[in-house]
Amino acid sequence: MPIANVIRIMRRILPAHAKISDDTKETIQECVLEYISFITGEANDRCQQEQRKTITAEDVLWAMGKLGFDDYIEPLTIYLNRYREIEGDRPSNSLRSEAFYLNKRGSASNTGGMDYYYGPPPPPAGMLPPHGPPYHQAMGYMDPAAAAAMGTYYGVGPSPGSSSSANSPSQANLAGFDPFAPFKY
Amino acid sequence: MRQPGIYSGMLSGLSGKTGPHSLPLARIKKIMKKSGDDVKMISGEAPIVFSKACELFIEELTRRSWMMTMQGKRRTLQKDDVASAVAATDIFDFLVNLVTEPLNGDEDAPGGTDIIEH
């Protein structure tokens, strides 16, 4: 793990006048390696229990929740969704078009059980999600209210090649569409 | 958990197809594979999540360590500060053996005998 990258991230946090001893830099670097191994081990255990061969992003996020890094899950989910949006039109990424939301404060338990609600990513402003296969809630975690909300959303949209004026009805619907509404506490 | 700036920092690693991510994806993947003999396959997105997660982890560990430095009224972040931060944080329990020197009489001696290569 390149130490320069680690130091750069540390410097974002530290005030300008702060100094870092050399053995601290190495220590933090080793901690990162340990962190990756720690989380991966837990994620891998889960894959094996479920007889899956591939560790997925969801497994990693689940492991983080289980091991106490709940606070990371929301920013990482957002980050991952952004990544999927940007990469979404690539053939290699079109297989995993499901994004997921988290249901954090209400049902995250200390025993590590996390509920992931699967659904389409929030649309970029003024646009529909990328063309492709319809989003499947394949994992079955969707609650009926959320499914209904998303069903409504997907019932509306401009036909291909429509002008910008035809976008406004969908935008009006988008304005009322709050993907997190079912999950508010 | 720091919230402001979370979007401004969030997208900085996504400006191109492969990066720049803060930590190299191939290296992360290698570390994941080494974590266990039975790690088989890793999806393309898992290292992406880790690259961001490691940033968050480094930021949190640094922040907590620096708090220890400030308590000591110092300006140089020392390894002992990291050890104190780890001891004070439940979720960092898995790091205790990594950051704590075995006691050889003088608890405050800086750890200098270990040469770690990566």
Image (cartoon, rainbow, N blue to C red):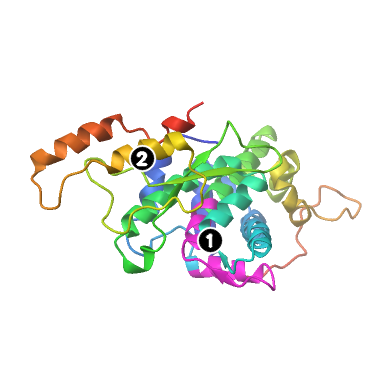
Q: Quadrant of the N terminus of chain A?
A: bottom right
Q: Is residue A31 visible?
A: yes
List x then y, in percent, for residue A50.
64, 61
Q: Is residue B5 visible?
A: no
The mark that comes first in sequence, 1 or 2, is: 1
Q: Quadrant of residue B101?
A: bottom right
B39 part of magenta stretch = yes
Tell me the tag on residue B83.
Answer: none
Question: Is A146 placed above or below A118 here?
Answer: above
Q: Main secondary structure of the magenta part?
A: helix
List x then y, in percent, for residue A90.
31, 65
Determine the chain carrying the residue at label 2: A
Q: Nearer the viewer, mark 1 or mark 2?
A: 2
Q: Quadrant of residue A109?
A: top right
> The residue tagged with tag 1: helix, strand or loop?
loop
> What residue is shown with label 1?
A56
- Which residue is at 39% across, 63% downward? A95
Residue B43 versus residue A116: which sits nearer the camera?
Answer: A116
Determine the chain carrying the residue at label 1: A
Residue B56 versus residue B66: which sits nearer the camera?
Answer: B56
B118 part of magenta stretch = no
> The residue tagged with tag 2: helix, strand or loop?
helix
Q: Amino acid at mark 2?
A: Met
Q: Is residue A180 left or right of residue B27?
A: left
Q: Is residue B111 left or right of residue A164?
A: right
- Which residue is at 53% across, 51% downward? B53
Cα separation between marks 1 and 2: 25 Å
**Magenta-drawn segment:** B26-53
> What residue is shown with label 2?
A150
Q: Amino acid at mark 1?
A: Thr
Q: Quadrant of residue A167?
A: top left
- Which residue is at 60% across, 66% downward? A52
